[in-house]
Amino acid sequence: MKLDILAFGAHPDDVELGCGATIAKEISLGKNVGIVDLTRGELGTRGSADLRDKEAANAAKILGVSVRENLAFADGFFLNDKKHQLEIIKMIRKYKPEIVLCNAIDDRHIDHPKGSSLVSDACFLSGLLKIETEVEGKQQEKWRPKLVYHYIQWKSIEPDFVVDVTGFIDKKTDSVLAYSSQFYDPKSNEPETPITSKNFIDSINYRARDLGRLIGVDYAEGFTTERYVAIENLSKLI
């Protein structure tokens, strides 16, 4: 299956939190979108890896993505090395996306910038003919995505561009709340973490509203890019 967009996240819920509304919008426009999680989030304070698997599947259904895979890298300990790069390359060559979305280039959780650089490096390497990979006994062809964008996570990084996601913020919120074990629950007896506060859940809305305010729409999501943002002509700006 060829995808238009392939979104990578170091943990299940990274993609939903970082760019869930953008994904929902692109799917509404007829784009085929997939998600690849690098780890199962097994070091998360709340819940378990098995529960996260179920939550991720539910979130994928809410967003309407075409496929979701998990590479089961070691949460907290995966590296940007040849072994892990080759596994990412296999995913890129398998789905041949035009656009790749990946973790924030700088963030509070150490896996986020690691995942960001790992996926970005693999996108380049995937286009090299002499790197050979195979999946299910079949040799893969080289493939390099045209664009690599990084969504924004915990830190308020200045975006290089923003996407108008008005009309899709509720679907994003629903996909995030599919991870019920991870976020605000006043009845839970599990330990508190930086993402279990009501303020964190509220931030999904107010951060998107603030970015929207800055461009004159209701809601927006921000991204950084590794190259200049190019537009077809001046009238394409909003």
Image: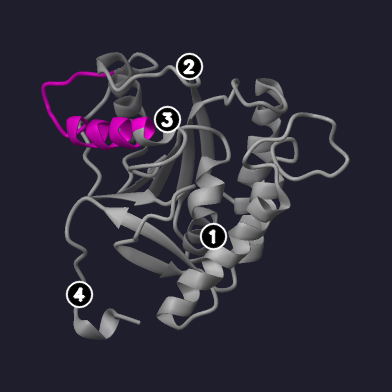
Residue hosting label 2: 74
Q: Position of residue 83 (x, y in %)?
A: 30, 14
Judging depth in this view, the residue of 218 and 184 nearest the camera is 184
Q: Indicate whether residue 68 is drawn in magenta.
A: no
Counting residues from the start of the chain, the first of labels 4 and 1 encountered is 1
Residue hosting label 4: 232
Q: CA distance from mark 4 to mark 1?
A: 24 Å
What is the secondary structure assignment of the residue under circle 3?
loop
What is the secondary structure assignment of the residue under circle 4?
loop
Point out the image quarter for the N terminus: top left
Q: Residues within 10 Å of mark 3 (few under 14, many from 20)?
A: few
Q: Looking at the image, do the residues carrying marks 4 and 3 touch, with CB atoms under 8 Å apart?
A: no
Residue 109 to residue 235: above or below: above
Q: CA distance from mark 2 to mark 3?
A: 13 Å
Residue hosting label 1: 21
Query: Residue at (75%, 40%) from the top-left corner?
Result: 180
* Amino acid on which the number 2 mark rests in the picture: Ala
Q: Looking at the image, do the residues carrying marks 2 and 1 touch, with CB atoms under 8 Å apart?
A: no
Q: Which range is magenta? A: 114-133
* Amino acid on which the number 1 mark rests in the picture: Ala
User: Left of 76 or right of it: where is 186?
Assistant: right
Counting residues from the start of the chain, the first of labels 1 and 3 encountered is 1
Query: Residue at (53%, 36%) from the top-left corner?
Result: 68
Q: Position of residue 112 (x, y in %)?
A: 42, 35
Q: Position of residue 119 (x, y in %)?
A: 32, 34
Query: Residue at (37%, 38%) from the top-left corner?
Result: 95
Q: Main SS of the magenta segment? A: helix
Please identify, in this view, whether the residue under mark 4 or under mark 1 is nearer the observer. Answer: 1
Q: Looking at the image, do the residues carrying marks 4 and 1 touch, with CB atoms under 8 Å apart?
A: no
Residue hosting label 3: 110
